[in-house]
Amino acid sequence: MDLDGETNLKQKEIVVKKDSNPFELTDFLDFGFFIRAEPPNVDLNTFHGSFESYSHDDQSSVIYQNNILLRGSAIRNTDYIFGMVIYAGRLSKAVMNNGEKRKKVSTFEKVINGDIGTGWRFRIAGIG
């Protein structure tokens, strides 16, 4: 994904607990958790949210922009990951950021289209 215009690899960071230790698989199996996140928006460069445990306050953590992957991102040089979807479909930042596709039209095409339109107007008006 190169929404920022660059195709180089972007290094991401893992989400860590409040005590700065990384989460382990057993952490996910032992407690219930929820994500508290900002509402969906078009800003690709910011994200504010938290990963919170229902029962263990020490296993909560803050989620930043460098902890998330946008829709369409490819994961490389990684053995495995644990992840979850925060926004999906039309609410994802990548989709919300895509405006309407602009049609590329050359100056020559604009002139020809204008001439054709003018010709039809004269023909319909009975001139020519």
Image (cartoon, helix red, strand yellow):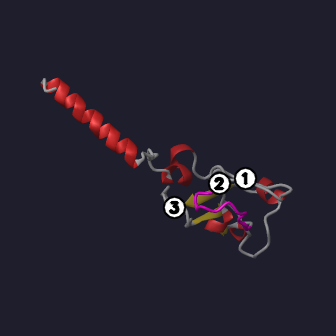
Q: Determine contact: label 1, label 3, CB under 8 Å.
A: no
Q: In the image, which is nearer the foreground, mark 2 or mark 3?
A: 2
Q: Position of residue 11 (x, y in %)?
A: 73, 67
Relative to 91, residue 51 above or below: below
Residue under label 2, please give it.
1
| Residue type at the position of mark 2 | Met
Magenta highlight range: 1-13
| Residue type at the position of mark 3 | Glu
Q: Determine contact: label 1, label 2, CB under 8 Å.
A: yes
Extreme residue toward the left, this view: 126
* SS class, disc 2: loop
* SS class, disc 3: loop
* SS class, disc 1: loop
Tell me, for residue 38, which label it has, or none: 3
Q: Position of residue 46 (x, y in %)?
A: 55, 67
For the stretch drawn in magenta, the main secondary structure is: loop
Residue under label 1, please give it.
74
Instruction: First in sequence, mark 2 or 3: give its number.
Output: 2
Residue under the image location 83 percent in, 57 percent down: 25
As rendered, which of 24 and 47 lies closer to the eye? 47
Give the quarter of the image for residue 24: bottom right
